Amino acid sequence: MKLSSEQNKFVDDLLSKMTLEEKVGQLNQESPSIVGGFDVPFEELIEMLTDGRISQEEFGKIMATATRDYHEDDIRAGKVSSFLDSDPRKINELQKIAVEETRLGIPLIIGFDVIHGLRSVYPIAIAEAGSFDDKLMEKTARMAAKESRAHGICWNFAPMIDVARDSRWGRVSEGPGEDPFLGSRFARAKIKGLQNGCDEGEDYVAACTKHYVAYSACEAGRDYNTTSMSISQLYNVYLPPFKAAMEEGACSAMASFNDLNGVPCTVNSYTLRDILKGEYGLEGFVVSDANGIKECVTHGMAEDDIDAGVKAMNAGLDMDMGTHIYYDHMVQAVKDGKVSMDTLDEAVRRILGVKVWLGLFDNPYVDEAVIAAYEKEVPKEHMELCLRAAEESIVLLKNEGDILPLKRDTKFSLVGELADRADEVVGAWSLGWKKEECVSVKEGLKAAGAAFDYYPVCGPESKINEEELKAAISSDNDLVIAVVGEYKSMSGEASSRADITLPGQQRRMLKELKEAGKTVIAVLMNGRPLALGWEKEIIPAIIEGWHLGIQMGTAIAEVIFGEVNPSGKLSSTFSSVNGQEPLYYNHPNTGRPGSKSKFTSRYLDAPVEPCFPFGYGLSYTSFEYSDLKLTETSDEIVAEFTLKNTGNLEGTEVAQLYMQDVCGSLVRPVKELKNYARINLAAGEVKEVTLSLKKSDMGFYDNQGKYVFESGLFRIYVGGNSRDTLVEEIIV
Ligand code: BGC
């Protein structure tokens, strides 16, 4: 985001005309309050949804008819800057009040959680990052920006770029996995996709990078829990995607709920003012997470709401989501000298700047004709892109004896309640989809002409239906495709799980089928890396299908029948058992690396190795790496190697380059991803591949947050995952 001098002048002029009250109004975000329209209090309704007394669908129906307060009078009084909503007609109405009925006619900035698509939902981020396809990630973001803008949403609370190392944390689903380098490339692609339309005269939105910062490092993987770490770890692991996003000109950031080393990120001037706005040069603004300012009182960081508001404002938190604390107290705080006018002006200038950059002063409304077109159907090219993203995100984890792909006339049994759940394919944080546009695995297989009998048997939470299990066992079909995993509500916000094995009785279902002599292919549908030690031993073929979005069923069927050769890789390590978490590949070395000897860093009752390592994923063909050679130029290390497709099918390999700084002034990770490329090879084809590593990427941050490069011995690895690699050494 860059403003021209004219745009800056416009902002300054506007600011000079504003009263104190109008300025404070610009710091306030509202959302519709549910005020009635159903028989029980809203809180109880949420409880009912949480404990399963009503389904998501029933909840949705009730919500659709609920009465809402849109705070029109507050908008009219200039007390609202931003609104959180997605109903385009309502947005037009609210915008009209802001533009035509307030003294200065400042438009609202409409924000919404469009995390992985609005109507055209594509794979959850942890899955899409596994495509290692930056162009694809950019394109899906561009599509989301288009659909958002068409619905009046001009500020997406995305990308979520929390590097997540603990799979118990439910929000791993929303982000690009465990690696800061992949996370940074993902962040760049998403910012380009969401925002660059501005330069190209297309629909675009302001991105909101989140959750700033280190939210994913919550202790024990429990959402909202405390985080503490060294400055070096903060800079090397959690900050890089935010730095990358800021370099691409991201318009805003959302302060996270957690405290970091004792200071909640909402009131943390070190992370907000010094790093984000100072070092990284954020030009736009920072919004709190929902209710974040008030929670500083609960954290015990502020005495009361006023204190929390003053601390947040002085720390550089510009917009209040959800608490009204700025709105209620900031005028007085400025009058009392607790917040300076300069501080207030800076926040307002940042917010107005984004509104100007979005073109809202010239064009605040949604085109009703565009809405009507979307209401009819999703554009065909959006459906196609969702399908491509789903295809590229699927990871083949196991394929013993090349059971897959299946011949199209193979008769099989399909089991698992999830197979028939079109409403579950979209995953967590998906809010604008239509069920009739979602393809379940069962529907996808049917459309592909598959011959199967379906037995739901059980889902992630339901008990085994013994009759259905018996029927599946006694069926003549020797082959079973079992769709197992998690509901979408089992990942995402407030959805941490202490046990990350397959939930409910799904394992028992697989076991009984296996013991009955069936050949079982597992298709996983999940929002987090699961602990799959048992499944890896027992099940001959495993497809990681994540929550792939509206085209999930079509993509899974294509992979099952070999129309698409899987090419996705894991963006996160998979554990064998729960107790290994947090487990990630780029861990610092210990003085006693885990081995078979007793006094090493290991478990008595579990392996130290992952079940499936970061970067892992099979293909229906096979690839061979050889002849790694390193050369040094003035600013790069160039790795050249030979990649051969040794199988009988065309395929795409994600070739990965890792580095190890063997000895440093701080203990360095055993491996760090530093580059990757998707390479397509015909059967038998050989390619000479070059992946380079910039010297400027070979250093690390010390405990003062200073980037240092230390010359010495480096190991460079290339391979198809973080474990199985070639290695060469070089002194740099
Ligand atoms: C979440 C954010 C989200 C916000 C607004 C919060 O609860 O943590 O990720 O953007 O709600 O919906």
Image (cartoon, grey):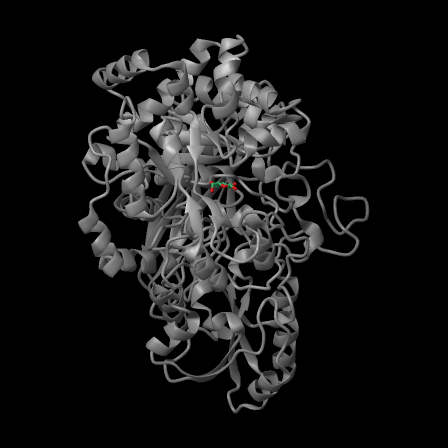
* Residue at left offset 20%, top offset 45%: 367
Residue 116: x %, y % from top left = 40, 49
From the viewer's perspective, is 214 left or right of 505? left
Q: How many numbered badges does the structure rendering display?
A: 0
Residue 256: x %, y % from top left = 54, 33
Residue 405: x %, y % from top left = 42, 73
Q: Taking 632 as reference, is 403 above or below it?
A: below
Residue lying farthest to the top in this orientation:
337
* Residue at left offset 55%, top offset 51%: 42
Residue 579 in view of the camera: yes
From the viewer's perspective, is 268 left or right of 691? right
* Residue at left offset 66%, top offset 74%: 508
Q: Taking 725 as reference, is 681 above or below it?
A: below
Image quarter (top left, top right, bottom left or bottom right) of the N terminus:
top left
Residue 230: x %, y % from top left = 64, 26
Q: Nearer the viewer, residue 507 or 683?
A: 507
Q: Nearer the viewer, residue 315 or 561?
A: 315
Which quarter of the picture shows residue 519?
Answer: bottom right
* Residue at left offset 27%, top offset 29%: 101
Q: Nearer the viewer, residue 16 or 695?
A: 16
Residue lying farthest to the right in this orientation:
598
Residue 706 in view of the camera: no
